[in-house]
Image (cartoon, coloured by chain):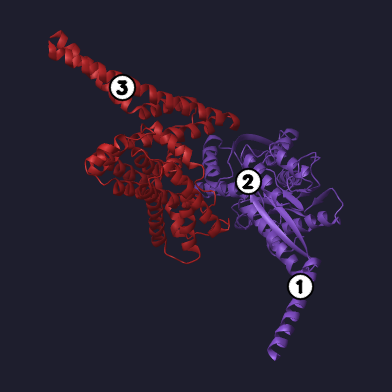
Chain colours: A purple, B red
Amino acid sequence: MVFTRTCFRAFTFSVALMASGLAHAEDVRTIKIAFSVDVLDDTQNAATQAMHKRVDELNASRKDVKIEFDVYDAQGSVDKQISDVQTALIKQPNVLIFSAVDSVGSLPAMQAAKDAGVPILDRRPTSPVSDLTTVAFYSSDENRYSKATTEWIKGYLKAHPDSVLKIGAIYGAPAQTAQLLRIDAIKALAAEMPDRIQFVAEGYGNWLTATAQNLSQDWLLAYPDINYIATANDIMALGVSNTLISAGRKDILVSGYDLTPDGVQRVKDGTQSLTIGTSIADNGKTIDVALGIVDGSFKDKTYYLDPVYAVDAGNVDDFLAGKIK
Amino acid sequence: MTNLTGSAEHGGIAALRRVLLLNKAVLFALILAVVLSVASPYFLLQQNIVALLEQIVVMTIVALGYTLVLATGEIDLSVGGMIALIGFVIAKLMTTYGVPVPVAIIAGMALGAACGALNATMVSRFGLPSFIVTLATGALFTGILYILSNLVPVSNLPPGFLAISRTKIGPIPLPVILLVPVVIGFYVVATKTVFGQHVIALGGNPEAVRVAGINITRLRLKVFMIAGACYAVAAVLLTARSASAQIGAGSNLLLIVITAVVIGGTPLLGGKANMIGTLFGCLILGMISNGMNLLGVNANYQIAVQGLLILFALVLDIESTKLLLRLDKRSMLRRRQAGAL
């Protein structure tokens, strides 16, 4: 008899517990965020890690939401990106974070999300911004990057009034059109200041250190007066830096993008002149904006990740000490 | 008498023609070198020749190992993944675990051989085509690299390791000097050893090799392990040259290497191994890239020109092989006729 009563009490208690658990589960809203990334290179990976970190922070601090964050790496292929988004949509995400492999080629992927009623946070918006985009998120914003570069060059030329820049330019991969602006902006400046800036050579480094290294090695011979090699990212700037170290040349400027730790360190060491970018750690804000889109609290059409840093020998110590904001 | 002299002269020309056709990569490289030296004043500068050789070292070492693989009638698509993984492991061993440079390099070579052994075992044990196996293992190696590295490259390599690429003997970088014994070694292996003969025989007629009682499984294992060790050496040189282990290192090598080997005279279907041809195939590709950079060819045109030149080299290869066969046939007929007389 006593045993039966005990069993009954235990059963009642369990049911009560389960009921409270269910009630609690009903209060927690699951938000699914899908991220289709163009290529998960070390820079994009670092940005993705920052997003993962932010998701973990939010899941730990907010009791009302549970965020599920899925990342799909298109590996630089438009075709794979379209397939990735199709797969992601099967899981019915609340929002799609999108970084296009190609601004035109990847449009079908965005269209598919739009058709499925999934809002799009575009981390690599085109100019003008596509109608398919819900929020244009400017992190590695090519326009602001280009502006920072040209401003830096103008400053350099002002400080060196006798200097004429003879530039060799190393683009990333030809299929990735957005990054072309990083070099093309310097070309536009050269067109404005033909007596101060001249392009002597250009090539594709395909985001590879070794390719950029070979290219710059050839240029040092073919263009003895070259005095600035501009690259589209820090990985390729490393190749140029290796060439210059090998050749014992310290008179040639080298610039890169993305503000990678290695890139910043080379600026500190004096083997790279400039790296431009936003702080990778700040990319966690992408998640906050994505949540804002889902709950309707973020109403703007654009978001700018600030600030864009131009780190050179003059401010690298302050940057590393966190004094530049 | 006149006939005899004429016949000797004819034989001499035929022999010369035969030598040139057999070494068409050498011929094509020479033509290209002449064209580039006329077109660019920088091409023949000692500094450029050294730079050119330095640029092709990694490609050539991979291509030499690859020639053995192709000679057996197999293919290896795991090159890129393997090189990046080995480079990362070596760099990580040195920077994180303080492993001495020589030990890390040996470990990398062992890893390369092990990866090659995995490829060979999968092909032999399960009878799978190497095309599929190495496609899968390539993805496996890349995946392991991504997991281990979290896509973060390894820098701050020890000076002793960086010295591999930065040391020069006279004007010549150490990797270029290291290439010489490697090429000679591969040439000797392919042409003067029983192992080399077996490799070529396996690519030409695997059934005959099997009937002859040669252990094909063991032979394939050795070939893939040697190739893996070559990729490891290439990974060492690439990592030292880049002064860091990059995640994308070697990702562009596969197609370049296959092209160089085929241009060099080793057919895709196997049965031949022309190591000197491979060296010159690499030199041709290096010269095309170097030459266009020196000539300031527009970057977009470079891609098209590169494709056209490679196509030209491949067509030249096919056509010269046909010509060689015709010459052989004609010479055989002539000998028969001479015998009949």
Residue found at the far top of this picture:
B2
Chain where mark 1 sits? A
Please name the residue shown 38% across and 40% down the image: B74
Q: At label 2, which amino acid type do we have?
A: Ala
Do the residues at discs 3 and 1 belong to one chain?
no
Residue A249 can be seen in this image: no
In the foreground, A146 or B189 = B189
Q: Is residue A51 above or below residue B205?
A: below
Q: Secondary structure at mark 3?
A: helix
Chain where mark 3 sits? B
Q: Nearer the viewer, mark 3 or mark 2?
A: 2
Do the residues at discs 3 and 2 belong to one chain?
no
Q: Nearer the viewer, mark 3 or mark 1?
A: 1
Q: Nearer the viewer, mark 2 or mark 1?
A: 1
Please name the residue shown 77% across and 77% down the image: A16
Q: Is residue B172 above or below residue B298?
A: below
The disc at residue B324 is 3
For disc 2, the marked residue is: A74
User: Would residue B170 be found to the left or right of residue A99 on screen?
Assistant: left
In the foreground, B197 or B4 = B197
For disc 1, the marked residue is: A21
| Mark-to-mark CA distance, 2 and 1 | 39 Å
Q: At label 3, which amino acid type do we have?
A: Leu
| Mark-to-mark CA distance, 3 and 2 | 47 Å
Residue found at the far bottom of this picture:
A2
Q: Are marks 2 and 1 in contact (CB under 8 Å)?
A: no
Q: Secondary structure at mark 2?
A: loop
